[in-house]
């Protein structure tokens, strides 16, 4: 039976009322409900500005909600089978930082896969936690890191019984999921908190055809990007919690440290209405989406020179499960890199893909994806194959050695250590003072406190040449290292 209370959008409804109230605004924001004419207001209209308010009377406060924000958060928790939810207006990045900082104190151990997002590394720096990295399952054919096995988590817990948390990606950027239920049950048997990065898993909460969500698996806390796959505005996310292991006072205090005191009402309203839409329409529309995705995959399998990855392929590689709203396409047999295809698809066919790796590209589907869009995707790759298959030399067979650099210090120590800036070629065997990553997806090649090997340098150079998405603090061919000669490490209490 459908719960009719989810027809309500408490925050959005109150926000509309305020915008229509003809109030005399002597508070911020300075546009005074759209009374300053500019190019944006001419394009989108005044109505959007009427919804851009900053906690006036009746609209509640995100730092300590007691009214319509609290009501909207309660509906979100109910929709996701969680005990409590927290709205975020600075993305899942803030959620991940808050999760780690509220659970882990300085020198606490946290077990996590090495293919985590950069925000996790920043959480380690801010909290002072010590990472215990698990090597994820590696797909040598595609050149990507996937899930973590239950056995690897069990081994890490047995070797680190003093760990306070296990961190799991649900799903990875490429849609691969771990056996989160089994991992969670074992972690709880050992009195360890389970956190989940669900930046790409908001849709899990609204369809039985999706893999298990973190809350269904019994995890203690997750950070979920409603904007990525559930239809809210970019930068709007939620934290979800379940059970009694989370200290909500500490979590709230941490969020209030990290979030703006002027949160966007537009972002919060978009979460409110996205939850309603997904609650009532998610099951049916995700089922239809999966049918269209399967049809598209089957058609694309006949295109020469490309390989479309499906659930059967993922499971044969030993992975636990797969989110079929992701379409992974191996393109290197066309003689093109994923980076080249990413550019060509936009330039020639006006198709914007999510990301590229050396041998693959990724398309993300949501209930906003139409059959027309998928037909264009098929036709774009069909034309690409016609243009390039049997013309260019084949791209070299993938050689993928997953970077698992040696840890010299915890990330926080290296972050605060004295630094030197050197060329990449002079950085061999030095200790990294910064994170270097590919964005998207934001997975670091090396993080502060890890030893820079020649393999790491070769990897950085490869991505520098192939992709514009390599991110570091410096210009190309330079890197920040720790000045070990002038380094006094923090004490264990810091």
Image: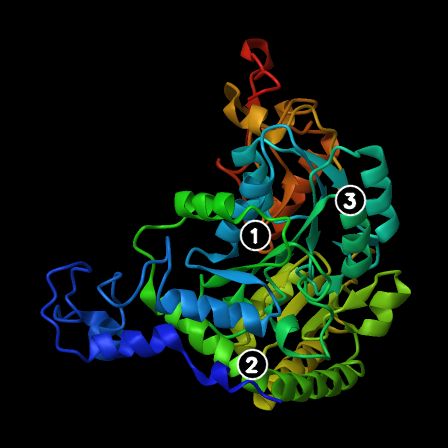
Count how many numbered circles sit on residues in the image: 3
Disc number lying in front (1 or 2): 2
Q: Nearer the viewer, residue 417 or 60?
A: 60
Residue 18 image-quadrant placement = bottom left
**Above or below — where is 279 with respect to 164?**
below
Q: Can residue 233 be seen in this view?
A: no
**Above or below — where is 48 with respect to 402?**
below
Q: Which of 139 and 54 is in front in this view?
A: 54
Q: Is mark 3 on a helix, strand or loop?
A: loop
Please name the residue shown 41% across and 59% down the image: 89
Cα–Cα gap, marks 1 and 2: 31 Å
Disc number lying in front (2 or 3): 2
Cα–Cα gap, marks 2 and 3: 39 Å
**Residue 463's x, y, as percent?**
63, 47
Please name the residue shown 73% across and 33% down the image: 405
Residue 236 placement, left or right of 429: left
Residue behind mark 3? 402
Residue 13 placement, left or right of 286: left
Q: Is there CB contact under 8 Å for labels 1 and 2?
A: no
Q: Is there CB contact under 8 Å for labels 2 and 3?
A: no
**Residue 31's x, y, as percent?**
16, 64
Residue behind mark 1? 439
Residue behind mark 2? 279
**Residue 65's x, y, as percent?**
37, 59
Q: Is mark 1 on a helix, strand or loop?
A: loop
Counting residues from the start of the chain, the first of labels 3 and 1 encountered is 3
Residue 221 placement, left or right of 248: right
Cα–Cα gap, marks 3 and 1: 17 Å
**Residue 130's x, y, as percent?**
66, 32
Residue 26 placement, left or right of 437: left
């Amino acid at each position: 039976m459908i719960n009719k209370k989810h027809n309500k959008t408490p925050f959005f409804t109150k926000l509309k009322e305020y915008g229509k109230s003809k109030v005399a605004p002597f508070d911020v924001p300075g546009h005074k409900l759209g009374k300053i004419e500019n190019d944006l207001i001419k394009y989108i209209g005044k109505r959007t500005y009427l919804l851009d308010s900053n906690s006036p009377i009746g609209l509640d406060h995100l730092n300590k909600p007691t009214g319509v924000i609290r009501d909207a958060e309660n509906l979100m928790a109910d929709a996701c089978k969680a005990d409590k939810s927290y709205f975020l207006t600075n993305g899942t990045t803030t959620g991940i930082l808050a999760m780690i900082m509220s659970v882990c104190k300085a020198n606490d151990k946290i077990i996590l896969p090495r293919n985590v997002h950069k925000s996790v590394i920043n959480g380690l720096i801010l909290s002072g936690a010590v990472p215990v990295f698990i090597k994820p399952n590696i797909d040598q054919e595609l050149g990507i890191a996937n899930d973590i096995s239950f056995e690897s988590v069990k081994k890490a817990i047995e070797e680190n019984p003093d760990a306070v948390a296990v961190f799991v990606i649900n799903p990875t950027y490429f849609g691969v999921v771990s056996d989160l239920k089994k991992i969670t049950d074992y972690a709880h048997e050992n009195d360890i908190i389970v956190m989940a990065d669900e930046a790409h898993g908001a849709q899990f909460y609204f369809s039985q055809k999706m893999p298990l969500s973190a809350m269904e698996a019994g995890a203690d806390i997750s950070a979920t990007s409603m904007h990525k796959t559930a239809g809210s505005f970019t930068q709007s996310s939620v934290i979800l919690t379940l059970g009694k292991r989370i200290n909500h006072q500490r979590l709230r205090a941490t969020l209030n440290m990290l979030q703006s005191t002027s949160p966007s009402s537009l972002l919060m309203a978009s979460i409110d209405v996205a939850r309603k839409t997904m609650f009532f329409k998610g099951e049916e529309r995700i089922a239809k989406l999966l049918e269209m995705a399967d049809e598209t995959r089957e058609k694309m399998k006949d295109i020469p020179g490309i390989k479309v990855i499906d659930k059967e392929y993922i499971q044969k590689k030993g992975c636990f499960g797969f989110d079929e709203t992701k379409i992974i396409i191996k393109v290197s047999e066309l003689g093109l890199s994923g980076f080249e295809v990413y550019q060509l698809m936009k330039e020639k066919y006006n198709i914007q893909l999510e990301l590229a790796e050396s041998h693959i590209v990724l398309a993300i589907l949501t209930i906003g994806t139409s059959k027309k869009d998928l037909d264009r995707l098929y036709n774009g790759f069909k034309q690409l194959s016609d243009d390039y298959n049997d013309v260019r030399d084949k791209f070299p067979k993938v050689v993928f050695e997953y970077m698992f650099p040696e840890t010299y210090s915890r990330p926080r120590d290296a972050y605060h250590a004295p630094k030197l800036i050197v060329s990449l070629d002079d950085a061999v065997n030095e200790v990294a003072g910064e994170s270097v990553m590919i964005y998207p997806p934001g997975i670091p090649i090396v993080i502060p406190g890890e030893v820079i090997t020649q393999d790491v340098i070769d990897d950085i150079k490869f991505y520098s040449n192939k992709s514009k998405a390599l991110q570091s603090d410096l210009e190309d061919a330079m890197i920040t290292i720790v000045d070990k000669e002038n380094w006094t490490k923090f004490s264990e209490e810091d």
